[in-house]
Image: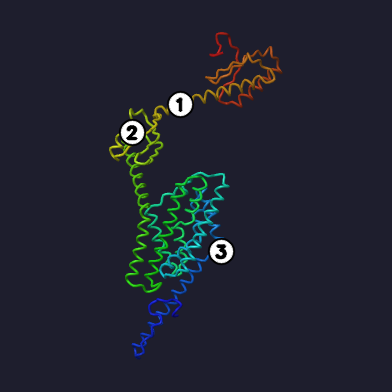
Amino acid sequence: MTGDHPGVPGLGDAPFDAGGRRATRNEENGAAVEGDALDRSLILASVARDARLDKKFLLLIILSAMIATLGLLQSSAAVVIGAMLVSPLMGPIMGIGFGLATLESNLIRRSLVTLAAGMAVAVLVAMLIIWVSPINDVTPEFRARTQPTLLDLGVAVVGGIAGVYAIMRKLSGVMVGVAIATALVPPLSTVAFGLVTGRFDFALGAALLFLTNTLAIAFAATIVARLNHFGPSLTPQHTAVQVVGIAAALGVLSIPLALSLNSIAREVRARSVVQAELRSLLGEGDRVDSLNVRVEGDALAVDGVVLVDRYAAQLDNRLTARIGAELDRDVRVNIVQLRQQTNAAVQVEEQLNRRLAALEQREEDSRAILAGLTVGELLPRDRVLVDAQARRVIVQRDREVEGEQVAAAIDRIMASVQAAHPQWLIQNGALTAAEALPGE
């Protein structure tokens, strides 16, 4: 095994030949060391194989970019997670990490070429899909990948450690979790979205997220691989230089991430203060319908709509003064107050609506009754008197003039209309002028 994996402690060392138990123990230790070296060689071979640029890698990165872009456009977290599982970018990133640990320039170069090709293909595929898509709205899934923070760096570092452990222990299920936790292709799709739609702040933020995840995973893989005796036995000075270099790179990367986290924290605190102060200025029955708090440079912009029982005088000015004193910054407030109905007003309106509905129904019934009674013109319209308020209908008749057959026909018509409108009273009568019904 000497030469296959140079620098691994114990390889090539001749065992003791003093005999007895000591010799036996040394032979066992040598076999164990050689077995560990063989395992490390197999792991390196597997990492190098996953870092190759071949048709399989290109096909998977194309499919992953397509899935991620479509999922981001329709704001579907499940589809975006599917793209993370398909993505093969974890292979070259782990190749960079193991290459730095073992100082294998060929592995580092191969991994960098594969990673660069995968990034380019993913961005181009995503740009093509976004360009032909009729929907180019900024979805929550897009926006979630434009403001990376130190928390994302922490996730990527822990994910890189878990990924190396999974590779060394051959735990494929752990790698699935790492792929989901450390998003790689969705940020590249967001970069493409920013380039196509002209939102370069989106492209820059997503590129920073991708760089954060890539470097954190690679450096975490390097450290864990070194701790597990991958690579040559460096002097303490060389090891210190390697550790300081990785820490410096992560430190530089942490600067914009810390600024982003601080900005988000300030915005969250500002929103909490605005909500508390606005709530204190409103009445007990008032409520906030919508509230938008934005940090614009050193100033704070507050827009919203509140529903109030009675208008609050100088609400904008009072809220501006309170927020400015609490946060010590310039504040612009624009709160729209809308009068909301009280419970009594709602009850009166409901009663009025019910009465109007009842009147409309009575009017409709009266028209139907008139049409039914005057069908065939056996009864003239002027002989049918309707009192819609009392739901009563009087039919003026003279049976002697009508004749037996016509009178029987009118009786049948009246019976049929009465059956169709049981809530009404339809009756015969001979009214005088003094008995005329109200409204007639």
Q: Earlier in the sequence, mark 1 or mark 3?
A: 3
Three-letter residue code for mark 1: Gln
Q: Residue at x 44, y 47 (%)?
A: 201
Q: Is residue 106 visible?
A: yes
Could you say where residue 172 lies in the image, as x and y percent from the top left? 47, 66
Could you say where residue 310 lies in the image, as x and y percent from the top left? 36, 28
**Residue on which disc 2 sits:** 282
Quadrant position of the N terminus in the picture: bottom left
**Residue on which disc 1 sits:** 351
Q: Residue at x 36, y 50 (%)?
A: 261
**Residue on which disc 3 sits:** 56
Give the number of the mark in front: 2 or 1.
Answer: 2
Q: Residues within 10 Å of mark 2 (few under 14, many from 20)?
A: some
- Marks 2 and 3, how far apart in space? 62 Å
- Marks 2 and 1, how far apart in space? 30 Å
Judged from the image, the secondary structure of the residue bearing numbered disc 1 is: helix
Residue at the outermost left position: 325
- Marks 1 and 3, how far apart in space? 72 Å
Q: Residue at x 37, y 59 (%)?
A: 249
Could you say where residue 182 lies in the image, as x and y percent from the top left? 44, 58
Residue in the foreground of this view, choosing between 357 and 291:
291
Judged from the image, the secondary structure of the residue bearing numbered disc 2 is: loop
- For residue 27, the mark is none
Q: Earlier in the sequence, mark 2 or mark 1?
A: 2
